[in-house]
Amino acid sequence: MAVVQQILFFITLVVAFFFIWKRVARIKSNIQLGKQTPLTGETSQRWRNVLLIAFGQKKMFKKIIPAFLHFWIYAGFLIINLEVLEFILDGLLGTHRLFAPPLGGLYPILMNFFEFLAVAVLISCVIFLFRRNILRIKRFWSAEMTSWPRLDGNLILIIEVTLMLAILTMNASDQLLQSRDEHYAQTGRLFFSSFLMPLFDGLSTSALIALERFTWWFHIIGILGFALYVTYSKHLHIFLAFPNTYFSKLEPMGHINNMPVVTTEVKSMLGLATSETPTEAPGRFGAKDVNDLSRVNLMAAYACTECGRCTAECPANLTGKKLSPRKIMMDTRDRMEEVGKSIASGGPGLQDGKSLLGDYITKEEINACTSCNACVEACPVLINPLEIILEMRRYVAMEESGSPAQWNVMFQNIETNFAPWKFPSSDRFNWADELKSKS
Amino acid sequence: MSENYTVPTMAEMAAKNEAPEILFWVGCAGSFDDRYKKVTRAFVKILNTVGIKFAVLGPEESCTGDPARRAGNEFLFQMQAMSNITVLNGYNIKKIVTACPHCFNTIKNEYPELGGNYEMIHHSTFLQQLINEGRIKMKEGGTFKGKKITYHDSCYLGRANGVYEAPRKVLESLDADLVEMKRSRSKGLCCGGGGAQMWKEPEKGNKDINVERTEDALQTGATTVAVACPFCMTMMSDGVKNKEKENKVQVKDLAELIAESQGL
């Protein structure tokens, strides 16, 4: 019986890792559709961001209630997963609570701590479900939160609640078995799950064994299944938030990335010496599709967990415009998935006649942006939707000459009068006349 | 006023083989927009009174390219940037002060990559320094004593460059009652004028951004809305007019308020 379980467990593990590995490879190749951009700035600053903002959750704490609840889930995820190591080893070796004998008195302490976290995660998830569905917090119900994103958010919370209930039930049945069968290592009293013991006390030993085995399998298959689900879900932020904070922009938020290709051309137009000689054709100016964006932008789309803090702060969105920074990230991700899927099945990929700008994101959306950086400031994991918006504006302006008519007038004014307004440049210094005439 | 105000240009200074302490970058709004020209003049009066050796580029100044870049026209931006850098480097400019956060941001953050490296100071920081150094002497209980002033953060000063405190320190020196809007500092709401929106009608929505922001300002009960940016000035002034409060609430730049308090 035990051997059968070991073999089954091994097969489960192999199957799960195969599917997870396939998804990871797909996500990697999707991100690699993007352009490689040089990393500038101090590496130490990048690690600081990882530590403070990803590990330390610094920016989450701008909203104290969700930050507190999220912290328990985050800590639970990091720490309870240590127990998964024991699960996997037990499963493979056919042992039960492998770490209990060597850890001795430490084991019950650890188990109690894990249980405390499990309860904290459970309560936090229930409150989050309440906030999403009963309180209906506005940012979870805006236009881009269609049925799938809403279901995704709820599923994650429900799965986590179920997994935590499984672990507590398992511990409760395990404790009952400890007094009936010496195969079960003594863990001492586990505080939280012991409250569940009266529920199962009347069960026969064989029923208890079945319950313990069922919850054990349920938990480990649940975790493996969840890990696979996460790769299809907004929940991928649990992994990608870390690299995202590392690769995020270090310049002041007001800085817009330079286009060296343009610099070379402008310098030669002005007859200025250039050190760089144009080595390759400039390619497309700005971004029309996902392959025109940087890999950092694309990874950010996978790191987005659709919390909507960006959209909740966006002045355009707040005043009823179509622009939503969260939608920019969601669309980027959806388009990447579409292209990746097409390529994997031998389809046309990027040449499918569709593009990110046009089929997913409209000009009306990108034209509404005030570049105020409220979305960038709001993002707890340093995602920058503004970069994508500006790259698309570059495409529209330089490849299509399709900017709003009033912007084209502004461009003309700058070209002819060196000011965005239609004033002759000879009048530029007239403001001083009044001051001078007083003297 | 009987005082003599001078506005030397770089060309004049260079001809006399002199170098200014600072270059005052006026910006297009400061040069052409009737409302913001008043801010330019107020700042020049302060510079004159304090005795700062400054110069302007005058007719040699040209748009930094900020709106072109933000609207996506990178060619036009870089053309503007390169020609400005050529002028600035030609005069060997080291230190620039401007009253426009957009010019400030562009020259400070975006010109270095194109060969323009200058110490860039926004006039709010510059005014704060002058007050700290005692070069602008603030009188106790001046005209602003007890008056409610609220400060509207410019995105390009605040979030974009982390300048939140200098404008507030300047206002505090007026002995006024500085009140904060519900959204301020890093959470400050844009006036709606950034990202080249200043030059086009807003996209379809249910409200104009400047009206939304003006409501924040009016909620504070302040009679003066202090701004530090020409676009914020236009947007907030229009917002106050939209709310028909222009007789009760004034929109003023920091330099104007300081000049007023000095009787300039």
Image (cartoon, grey):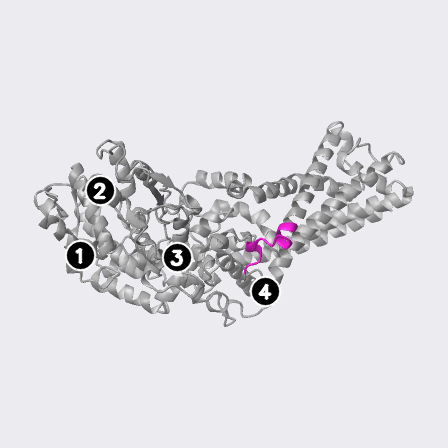
Q: Secondary structure at mark 1?
A: loop
Q: CA distance from mark 1 to mark 2?
A: 23 Å
Kindly identify which numbered label has been placed on residue A428.
Answer: 1
Kindly identify which numbered label has been placed on residue A341.
Answer: 4
Say few, some or many: other residues with alpha carbon within 10 Å of mark 2 (under 14 / 14 to 19 / 20 or more): many
Answer yes or no: do the residues labelled 4 and 3 have beta carbons within 8 Å?
A: no
Picture layout, residue B22 above or below residue B28: above
Q: CA distance from mark 2 to mark 3?
A: 28 Å
Depth-wise, is mark 4 or mark 3 nearer the camera?
3
Q: CA distance from mark 4 to mark 3?
A: 45 Å
Q: Are marks 1 and 4 on the same chain?
A: yes
Tell me which segment is drawn in magenta: A130-142
Q: Residue lying furthest top in this view?
A: A105
Pinpoint the chain carrying mark 3.
B
Depth-wise, is mark 1 or mark 4 nearer the camera?
1
Amino acid identity at mark 1: Arg
Q: CA distance from mark 2 to mark 4?
A: 64 Å
